[in-house]
Amino acid sequence: MGDFSTWLAMGGYAAFVWPSYAITAVLLIGLLVVSLWNLRRGEAELARNDRAGRTGAPGRRDRKVPHP
Amino acid sequence: MMSALALLRRDLRLALRTPGDSATVVLFFVLTAVLFPLGVGPEPNILARIAVGVIWVTALLACLLSFDRLFQLDAEDGSLDLIALAPAPLELLVLAKCVAHWLVTGLPLIIVSPVLAIFLNLPGEGYPVLLLALAIGTPTLSLIGAIGAGLTLGARRSGVLLPLLVLPLYVPVLVFGVAAIEAAVAGLPARPHLLILGGLLALSLPLAPVATAAAIRQALE
Amino acid sequence: MHRFANPARFQRLAGAILPWSAGLTVLLSIVGLWFALVASPPDYQQSETVRIMYVHVPAAWMALFVYANLAVASAIGLVWKHPLADLAAKAMAPIGATFTGVCLITGALWGQPMWGTWWVWDARLTSVLILFFFYVGHIALTNAFDDPTRGTRAAAVLALVGVVNLPIVKFSVDWWNTLHQPASITRLDAPAIHPSMLTPLLLMALAFFGYYVTVLILRLRHEIVCRKLRALRLTQGMGAPAMVEQGGS
């Protein structure tokens, strides 16, 4: 346990070493999550459009309009 | 070549018809520079130390004010389409517009800069080099600014966007423009800095019109 | 239809690369972090703060590398009007900006214990800061137009202007720094890097590279999806559903 706390202390520079790793992780993972989330959202919308197209309804709104 | 000269003459005539535009830029230059003694304090030593930097930075900012109108007005009344369709290469015509821009904004800035130098207590040795450095540096500012004006043509909030794009490009001019004058004030040769400033101008003279013309062609596509 | 042909080939290629790049990124990050935080010795001068280098320096490398990628993609997009290159440039800029931001923040966190200040106008820090502004300007310009193609093309011109200008900025900042040398500071760059430090440095750099590839693929896919959606909306908006149905029947 003493080993672990000396490691955590980083020779007295814990206040600089750990935040730099933490901020790096937050920024990089944040960008990854945002990118993934955007992609999922876009793909979902595309899938919705595809389904709307395949059932013959041109737009989502005019689904109720009978097919001529 | 003739069409470039004709465009230059037209732009100058337009600018002469509304001298207020030019005067606004010069007034902005003077007023911002005058704010510095009020902000920093009137001690002559401090003012002398920051004078060169303040003059250059305010000159950059004043220059920026005028770029959003460089192509915008022509784009709005449709003359930019005609300019782009003209038989003369667009690059040359862009260069003509840059020359006109420099004559109506850069040149007035150079003319009033000694007044600001007096306000800011610039040591006497700096004056000739101040004029020389501004004379070599401000054309580069006009050329680089034209790129930004071309790129932001038709953009949303182009007035805010343009400084964001152009100011980082201005760093070399600022660094060497200030270095030249500071060298002269310190009694060192200003020549190497002025030569690099000249080099920047020589580089941007052919390259900036090419980039600006490319940007304008895309804007009109 | 040929406009979609290339993105389709990209999708297949990306689908093959993605699991590998994602897996390698995770693996390299774990091993790299182990070496960076545990298995490498503290520096005799900078003690434990040297560990900041293992994220700071790879981030700086990636910031430059992504800009080089951005410039190449922009050139391809401008010269050959390749739609995928346009989208790639648009997808790269936020990643590059993030790496540049990481580099600046970790640099500040390294500067405070080493130089006693969060920020010094060191030539390197200053030029990285300007690189960051370049990225920000690029992103802002890309998104400043109602027509996204106009945005990517304008940003491409800006990226190429940056290629000419950034080395000059670097040169001028170096010059400026030698003129205004602040009171002596210990430079961060150790002249010779010990192998025990090189291992975590290279591992982290590879992990960052894998991360870049992974996120680039995800973002590019998103851009392609957006382009498809926009094309769909345009055909729907122009009252074209009838035409679509005619084509379908």
Image (cartoon, coloured by chain):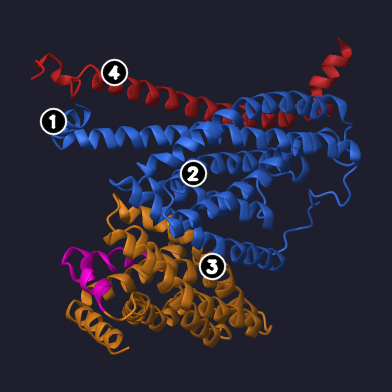
Q: Magenta region: which residues? A: B64-86
Question: Which chain is assigned orange?
Answer: B
How far apart, in angstroms, are the residues tagged by discs 3 and 4? 74 Å
| Numbered mark located on residue C88 in the image | 2
Amino acid at circle 3:
Glu
Query: Where in the figure is residue B100, as x and y percent of width and height?
Result: 32, 80
Secondary element at tag 2: helix
Quadrant of the frame with the C terminus of chain B: bottom left
Residue shown at the point (16%, 20%) measured from the top left = A61
C191 in relation to B44, above or below: above
Query: Where in the figure is residue C223, as x and y percent of width and height?
Result: 42, 36
- Would you name the residue on which mark 3 appears? B43
Q: Residues within 10 Å of mark 2 (few under 14, many from 20)?
A: many
How far apart, in angstroms, are the residues tagged by discs 2 and 1? 34 Å
Quadrant of the frame with the N terminus of chain B: bottom left
How far apart, in angstroms, are the residues tagged by discs 3 and 1? 77 Å
Q: Is residue C118 visible?
A: no
Q: Are callouts 4 and 2 both on one chain?
A: no
Question: Which chain is assigned blue?
Answer: C
Question: Which chain is assigned red?
Answer: A
| Numbered mark located on residue C242 in the image | 1
How far apart, in angstroms, are the residues tagged by discs 2 and 3? 54 Å
